[in-house]
Image (tube, grey):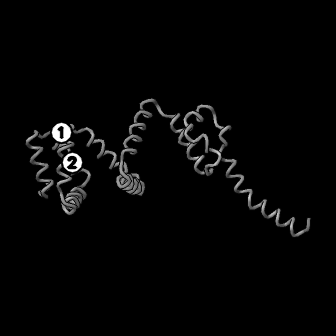
């Protein structure tokens, strides 16, 4: 073998090492534990031909699944079922929302989680009424409402929530009407 040929072989080997290392990081099918093989069975036939990144992601997902409680697994199955029933447009919209959520600061995320928790505590009728009222609003009205609420200090928001909790159903309707129409307090 000529000197030039040896250099070429060495160069090709060196270039191939990172690729081989990446493949080594993602286990082959026969290296997976039996419980992970059961979870990942739909990929068995093509596992070794999947890109290393995909195999690693699937292994991480299997590990997360195994760490879940039965209740968490049931919720995950239900979310997957809903995802599968979504149209491509709905899935894209959800991906955009997730990106916006991930771009929020930790404080903003926590505030959003708290608002969602409070929404979940409403009765089904109250949630439906709130949804209908929101859907009936124009984008401009939604922005105006958001701006009004953002202008309140955290203490003012807390006081408003407390007044709302203590109000009668009729008083709550009136408070919502004023808030949605821009009357503020």
Residue sitting at x 70%, y 48%: 24
- Residue that mark 1 sits on: 125
Residue 60 location in percent, x, y?
56, 43
Alpha carbon of mark 1 to alpha carbon of mark 2: how far?
10 Å
> In this view of the protein, which residue sits in the foreground, 56 or 82?
82
- In screen coordinates, is 140 left or right of 54? left
Answer few, some or many: residues within 10 Å of disc 1's Cα (few below 14, many 20 plus, some between 14 and 19): few
Name the quadrant containing residue 18: bottom right
- In screen coordinates, is 9 left or right of 24? right
Residue sitting at x 62%, y 31%: 34
Residue sitting at x 23%, y 58%: 146
Answer few, some or many: residues within 10 Å of disc 2's Cα (few below 14, many 20 plus, some between 14 and 19): few
- In screen coordinates, is 12 left or right of 162? right
> In this view of the protein, which residue sits in the foreground, 24 or 146?
24
Image position of 58 with respect to 70: above or below: below
Image position of 182 with respect to 23: above or below: below
| Callout 2: SS | helix
Residue 177 location in percent, x, y?
11, 51
- Residue that mark 2 sits on: 131
Work out whether residue 12 can be spotted.
Answer: yes
| Callout 1: SS | helix
Name the quadrant containing residue 167: top left
> In this view of the protein, which residue sits in the foreground, 34 or 172?
34
Image position of 49 with respect to 137: above or below: above
Task: Tell me, yes or no, whether the two marked residues, 1 and 2, touch with CB atoms within 8 Å.
Answer: no
Residue 48 location in percent, x, y?
65, 45
Q: Residue furthest front?
A: 45
Residue 46 location in percent, x, y?
61, 45
């Amino acid at each position: 073998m000529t000197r030039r040929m040896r250099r070429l072989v060495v160069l090709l080997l060196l270039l191939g090492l990172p690729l081989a290392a990446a493949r080594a990081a993602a286990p082959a099918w026969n290296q997976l534990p039996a419980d992970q093989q059961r979870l990942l069975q739909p990929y068995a036939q093509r596992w070794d031909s999947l890109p290393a990144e995909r195999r690693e992601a699937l292994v991480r997902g299997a590990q997360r699944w195994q760490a879940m409680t039965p209740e968490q697994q049931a919720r995950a199955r239900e979310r997957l079922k809903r995802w599968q029933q979504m149209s491509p447009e709905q899935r894209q919209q959800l991906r955009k929302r997730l990106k916006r959520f991930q771009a929020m600061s930790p404080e903003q995320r926590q505030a959003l989680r708290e608002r969602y928790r409070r929404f979940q505590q409403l009765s089904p009728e109250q949630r439906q009424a709130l949804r209908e009222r929101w859907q009936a609003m124009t984008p401009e009205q939604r922005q105006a409402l958001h701006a009004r609420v953002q202008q309140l200090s955290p203490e003012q928001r807390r006081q408003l929530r407390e007044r709302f909790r203590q109000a009668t159903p009729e008083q709550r309707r009136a408070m919502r009407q004023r808030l949605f129409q821009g009357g503020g307090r």
